[in-house]
Structure formats: C-alpha cells, structure tokens
Image (spheres, coloured by chain):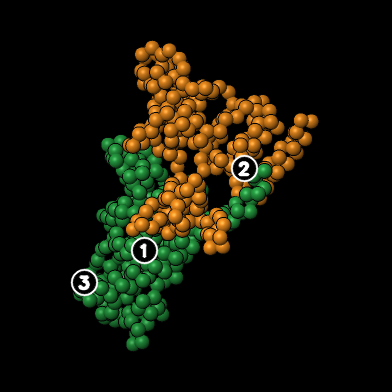
Amino acid sequence: MDSSAPPKRQLVIPGEPIDARGLKPGEGTFVEDGKVFASQLGIRAEHQGYVDVIPIGGRYIPRTDDEVVGQVVDIGPSHWLIDIASPYPAPLHATESPWRVEFGETSRFLEVGDAVLVKVFNVDETKRVQVTMRDRGLRRLTGGQIVEISHSKVPRIIGKGGSMISMVKQYTKTQAFVGQNGRIWIDGEVGDIVNAVRAIHMIDEHAQALGLTEAVEAFLEGIYGKRGA
Amino acid sequence: MEDIEHFEKEIQLVDGTGRRLDGRALDELRPIKIEAGVLKRADGSAYLEWGDNRVLAAVYGPREAHPRHLQNPSRALVQCRYNMAPFSVSDRKRPGPDRRSVEISKVTSEAFSAVVFTEQFPRTSVDIFIEVLQADAGTRCAGITAASVALADAGIPMRDLVVACASGKIAGQVALDLDKEEDNFGDADCPMAIVPRTGEIVLLQMDGHLTEDEFDRATKYSMDAAMRIYELQKDALRRRYAVRALEEERAEPGVIQ
C-alpha cells in the first residue's frame, strides 16, 4: 500500500467524503456528483473492489440466507409470525416448516413465545421478509437461554473461522448458536450457561479490546482450568 | 403582571461598538457543547448545551411504524416529538403538547426527512425525541442540531448531518444566534436548518420582518455559523467512537490468530 493510503480503519460520519481510490461504492455509501460519501456512522473498509462503511450501530436488516434466532409472536391458521429483532416481523408459512401442518393446526407445533432457529429465504424490495425452517439444522429451540447483543458485534462473537464461539462452547461444554441478528442461543448445565453468557457479555463489551481471545480464554480457564484437562 | 411586550426602547441590545448584552459580536455564536451517546436505552442520543439552552435528543428506529395505517410501503416515516420540560422556562410551562411544540415537531421531522435515506427502510418509522431541559431562545435550532447527532449515533443512514442556527434583527441590526433578551426585545428572528455539505436549507421560518438585504445577511451569518457547528457535531461523534476505533486497530493482531 502506498503512503498516501488512508488509515486502515477510519471513522466516517454521515455525509463525509470517502476516499474511494477507484473502488466501487459499496454498502453504507452513496454517490453524488461522482463522489463517494458515507451514509452511516462507521468504519471505512475495502472489500473485493468495493469501498464500504461498516456500521457501528443500527438495527438488524434481514438478508437472504441469514440464519437467525427468532421468537414466535403471533399465530395465524397457516403461518406463524416470527420476531427476528429487526424492524420487520417475519412470517413463517406452514409449508416452510418441517412438519405437515393442517390448516388451523399451527399452534400444535409452535406456540407464542417459542424460540426458533430460522433462515431468511426471501426479502423483497419493500423489505417483506419470509423465513423458512426447511433446511439443515433449523428447528424449534427447547431449553437453554437466549442472549441479545448488537448485530454489528456478531462477527466478533463468532471469531475468525468460528474460533471464539467454539472456544466458549468447548470450555463451558454448552451448545450455542449465534444468529446473524445478534441473538445467541445457549444450552447446557445452568452454571455453564451462566459462564457462557458472562463470556459473551465480555466479548460484547470489549469487542475492540486488545487480545480479546486471550482475555476470554483466561477468564474461562479461571473457571474450568486448562482446556482438555 | 408586567407587560413585557411593550416594554421596549429602554433596553439597549447593541452598544456603540457593536457588542451585544452578553458581550458577543453581531456574528458570534453562544458557546456550544455537544456530547453523543449519552443515553443507554435509546438507539442513539445526544446532549447539547448552547448558551443557556440544555437539550437532550434521543432516537429510536428504524422500527415498525405504529399505528399501521401510517406505514408507507415505499419509505420510512421520520417522526419527531419536541417537548419542553415544565421547568425549562421561568414561568412553569404547562406540560404536554401545545400549538408551538406541535409545530416545531412537524417542521423538525420534515427537515430530517430530507436527509434520511427513508427509502432504505420501507414501512418503518424513525422516531426522534427532543427534550428541552432549559430554554434560552433558539431551542428548535438546538433541538435539531442535537437530534442530528443522535440520528448518526443511532446508525441511521443520512445524506449529511443537519445543522440549525438562527439569525435575526436586534436594535435595527442583523445578528446571529439571538438569546432570550434579544429574542424578546428584538425585531426579527429567523431560524434555519442547513445541510452543510450541499448548502441546502431544510427549515426556514421567520418571526418579524426583515428586508431582502437583511435577510441575505442573516442567511450568510447562519450559513457560516452552521459550518462551525457542523465541526462540533462531527467532533462529538468522533470523541464518542474514535477511542473504540483506535483500540480496534490495535486489537486486530490479537484477535486474529
């Protein structure tokens, strides 16, 4: 990279011009008079020929193929309405469930308040969202606990190649699933869940801290002893 | 009660050297302090001190618009509530919306509709709450300036921040950013909300009369001041997030292994 390159992680404010350097305008940006500007508060990033703004805050906006943790908030005769922690409620049609559901029998399978693991399979231009449970690993979640964090911190919770979450799972001997919407489901022994939740809150609060993986590992080691011991 | 409306002439708002009651020059702003992200529960927030004005702004959303018949299938609504605390003025203000605050809420939401990328969030609403804790003239401008920082803090996509500032006429002279005495005993007050990057005006109101020349002068004063306030807004957001961004840069080698 040449010396005129902007700092690797630069905070941008809505309306601020972005140094695009021949890159295409990506997410969190807009173009006016041939110049690229940030549309959101975030960090400037380059990715596959695009210049993006990675938002710091903001609500979760569903995208196709996202796997999310949802909660049933309403039931119709042939569908359930799932809250996926976004501005848009997501209907789950009976035909998209893994069961053979007769008309009007929906509540026999999922009740209001049930947690489900669903996948976003369609989002149209008016942001009408449809979710499905007809895919591998998608199911109703029984037992365990759900923790909610900001969706923008999900990559940190997961870690590079899933390293962070699998470490937490290994130490605490829990099962966990991190939804793209920032909801995390954890199941295991009560004490272990509590520790896993504490580890997640730690990652959430110190998402940008130096040597986070080591800090979390040290925290878990303090409770469970060395890994594999 | 004293009839303050017709009490004029005796107060000299500008002295011979062009200084005002509080010692400011005609084109000088009151001191402004902005802080971003002061509230935990709201999606975004900001606190602003502008002279003796104290304003708190909070933003929620985009969230599902209620009642549902208000939803627009092609864009988000920008809704605003401007409210003055009962203790914000010297005579207790009767709580609740009144004609004035309903109007200010309306013009504020219209000003922000012009900059928010509403088409990105169809059927939702972005809700802005402006609470005036202490008032000393120019609260709508203070509210808009604060709300704009709160919107950015909430991660709402926008074309630019909005800056608002008033200019007016006191003792026959055009002046920037009137305070309470100047507003009460002055001749005109003209609040403006500006999109600094493009120079667009998204709110323009006027109380009193200005000649065309005076108006041009007032606009210039407000425009120049807006650029200065814009820097303060950006600075507030940077202060809130720069530390984190810096840490992130350092943290990277530690996290990726």
Reply above or below: B136 against B43. below
Circle 3 sits in a helix, a strand or a loop, which is it?
A: loop
Q: Which chain is green?
A: B
Mark-to-mark CA distance, 2 and 3: 58 Å
Quarter of the figure with the N terminus of chain A: bottom right
Q: Residues within 10 Å of mark 3 (few under 14, many from 20)?
A: some
Q: Which mark is in front, 2 or 3?
A: 2
Circle 1 sits in a helix, a strand or a loop, which is it?
A: loop
Q: Chain of mark 1?
A: B
Residue denoted by label 2: A203
At label 1, which amino acid type do we have?
Pro
Q: Chain of mark 3?
A: B
Q: Nearer the viewer, residue A99 or B17?
A: A99
Residue occupying the point 40% across, 38% down: A87
Q: Are marks 1 and 3 on the same chain?
A: yes
Q: Nearer the viewer, residue A27 or B103?
A: A27
Q: Which mark is residue B209?
A: 3
Q: Is residue B45 left or right of residue B10?
A: right
At label 3, which amino acid type do we have?
His
Mark-to-mark CA distance, 1 and 2: 38 Å
Q: Which mark is residue B196?
A: 1
Q: Nearer the viewer, residue A177 or A38?
A: A38
Q: Which chain is orange?
A: A
The residue most toward the bottom is B16
Q: Nearer the viewer, residue B84 or B41?
A: B41
